[in-house]
Structure formats: structure tokens, C-alpha cells
Amino acid sequence: MKKVRVNLIKKTDNSYDIIIGKDLFSAIADGLLKLNLNKIGIITDSNVKGLYGNNLLSLLKSMGLDAAMISFNAGEESKKRAVKERIEDALVSYSFGRDSLIIALGGGVVGDIAGFVASTFMRGIPYLQIPTTLLAMVDSSIGGKTGVDTPHGKNLIGTFYQPKRVFIDIGVLKSLPKEEMLNGIAEMIKHGVIADEKFFVFMEDYMDKVLSLDEQILIKAIEWCCIIKKKVVEADEREESGERKALNFGHTIGHAVEKASNYKIKHGNAVALGMLAETKISEEIGMINSFESKKIINLVKKAGFDEKLGDIEIGKIIENTGYDKKNIGGRVKYVLPRKVGKADIDVEVNEEIVAKVLGEMQ
């Protein structure tokens, strides 16, 4: 018997910077000019293309860079394998190779698809994240999660693949409707609940200024969220130790609500409903006291989220929780808060309790 050992103990340095500021496109272009790139592909959606994509493309071309833009219809319904395939075919038709770079210019859907494409095209090419929504700025652009949805649930197919850099330009937020701002607010509240009581209090005090795009407050809030997220990612980059699972607070039920509504309920409001439900479940099973529970519920209310599920079928929501990626051995696992700033992962809950709480939210 002969044995050949393949030694793969070296670890790749996947570190990167998050740059937060205003009017960053020129600095991004200058940085790309210094790299030895064959081609640059801007992946964006039909909304962002007109708002920022065309300007960025013109800027890159004016500096002599070989750039192309690929866009798809805006919305969660485009986050699927067929769209990824079309993007890959376009890259091949434009003669992209391993010496190329992708720019993910858009919100969470764009970032997830573009990152997934970058991770598999030519077995992996570098990419940048330029998030254009508050949600992507404070959450999805950081941490390297990529993926697409399937008919069975959200983000069931994807990779962990870190960007080379994240550029957060708060100037683009002026074009966001309030509904899109709330998508990000939900994730900001989540960060405070699971990891940082001081940030939670900051959001209690300055919610109105964040929503009104006060630049000083907004930069501080986004930076704080990035620090919280980066600490969690550093501790558990690929969800192996379990610490990163805490970021899914509100998402087990939130994703299930989205799917049960055929994605008519936006991500932020679905996550807000999920946080409300999961906080009430935690109180129901005696994990969190009523004082701490009320603080979470009141901040969600202060942000202006809907608090009722309406006519969404509870049985469908519960069924959809069965497709959650955190499930182990077919059992649904929840992230539940113990108090503001601390949450437990992998909590199993009797289905009757979940149904009771959801029923009270109709």
C-alpha cells in the first residue's frame, strides 16, 4: 500500500478594507487604474444601471479601462440560477478571463449574485462590493456570503467568497425610497440586539436622524454596524464555530414570511416581523424577561415597521422555516435574544409555541 499526502494547511489571507465616505467613484477608478487588469465587469440591476451604473462605466472607460456592464431586472425574483447563468454567458462573450475583475454595484441581490459569479467564474476571480442600499452597506456586502434563491427557500445555493474591498458611498442613499431604507434599519436593529447594547441605545436615540440621512450620524451608524459585523465574521468566517449564526436573528421566521407572501413583503419588514416573533417566542419560553423584550419590540415599532402578519397563512410560515439553512437533522433552529446585546443560537422551539406567537401577530 502506498500513500500520498496532499498538504493544504496554508491559509489564504482574505482580509480587506471597508471604505466609508462620500463621492468615492473617482477614488475607486484611480485604484483600478493601478491594477494590471484585462477587463472590468460591472454587474448591476435595472434600477441602479441608470442611477449610477452608466456614470461609473463612463468614468472607467474615460480612464482607458476596458469595462463592460451587465444588468438584470431589479428585484428578489431575479436572484436565481438562470440569471447567474446569463451573466456568466455574457462574461464569456466579452472574453473575460482570470485577469479580470467584477464590480458588484447595487443592493443585496446584486451583491449576492455578483459575488457568486465571481466565486465560480474561471474558478474564482476578484470582485469589489459597492453597495447602493443601506441594507447592503450594513450587512450583506460584508462577510463574503454569496448565493441565489430556489423555489424551496432563500440563499440555499451559494459560496463563501470575500470581496477584495468594500466601498460604502453614503451619497447614493439619497435616491432610496423609505421602504428601502427600512430594509437596512431592520439589520441595524438586529446588530444591536445580538451584539452591542450601546449601539442599540444609539439607534433608540438617533433613529430619526438615520432615517433623515443626517450625514454625521449615518456614517457613525454604518461604521458601527460594519465593526459589529466584521467582528462576527472574523470569529466565524464560514459559520463553522456557530458564532456567525447569531446574525440570523429574525431571519428564520423573516425568510419564511417572505416566501409565504410570494416576496410581496419586503426583506426589511419581513425581518422586522421575524425579530418581533422571535423576541416574543423567547419571552414565551422564559429566555428573555418582559422588560428587555419590550425594548426590542419598541425599537422595531419606532422605526415604523408593520407589526401584523395580515392574511399570510401561519401554517405556510411554519412549513417554510423547515427550509432554513441553520436547521440540523431536519429540526428548526432559532436565534433568540436573552437580552439586548446577547442572543443564543441553535434554540429548538415547540412548534405550538411558534404557532401561538404568530397567531397573536395576525
Image: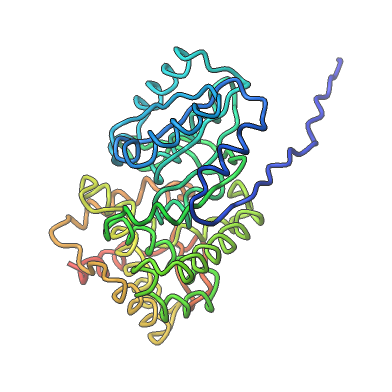
Q: Is residue 161 left or right of residue 335?
A: right
Q: Quadrant of the N terminus?
A: top right
Q: Is residue 35 above or below residue 90?
A: below
- Give the residue at the far front of this rendering: 62
Q: Name the spot of residue 12 as percent of width and height, x first.
A: 73, 38
Q: Name the spot of residue 135 as percent of width and height, x first.
A: 41, 55
Nearer to us in this view, 5 or 64: 64
Q: Residue at x 49, y 68 (%)?
A: 221
- Give the residue at the far bottom of this rendering: 291
Q: Name the spot of residue 151 as percent of width and height, x first.
A: 30, 35
Q: Is residue 330 above or below residue 151?
A: below
Q: Residue at x 41, y 79 (%)?
A: 204
Q: Is residue 280 above or below residue 110?
A: below
- Give the residue at the far right of this rendering: 2
Nearer to us in this view, 213 or 322: 213
Residue 211 sits in quarter: bottom left
Q: Is residue 236 left or right of residue 310?
A: right
Nearer to us in this view, 147 or 245: 147
Q: Name the spot of residue 8 as percent of width and height, x first.
A: 78, 31
Q: Residue at x 80, y 36 (%)?
A: 9
Nearer to us in this view, 40 or 144: 40
Q: How is the image coloured?
A: rainbow
Q: Is residue 115 above or below residue 187?
A: above
Q: Is residue 74 left or right of residue 118?
A: left
Give the total number of marks visible in the rendering.
0
Q: Quadrant of the C terminus?
A: bottom left
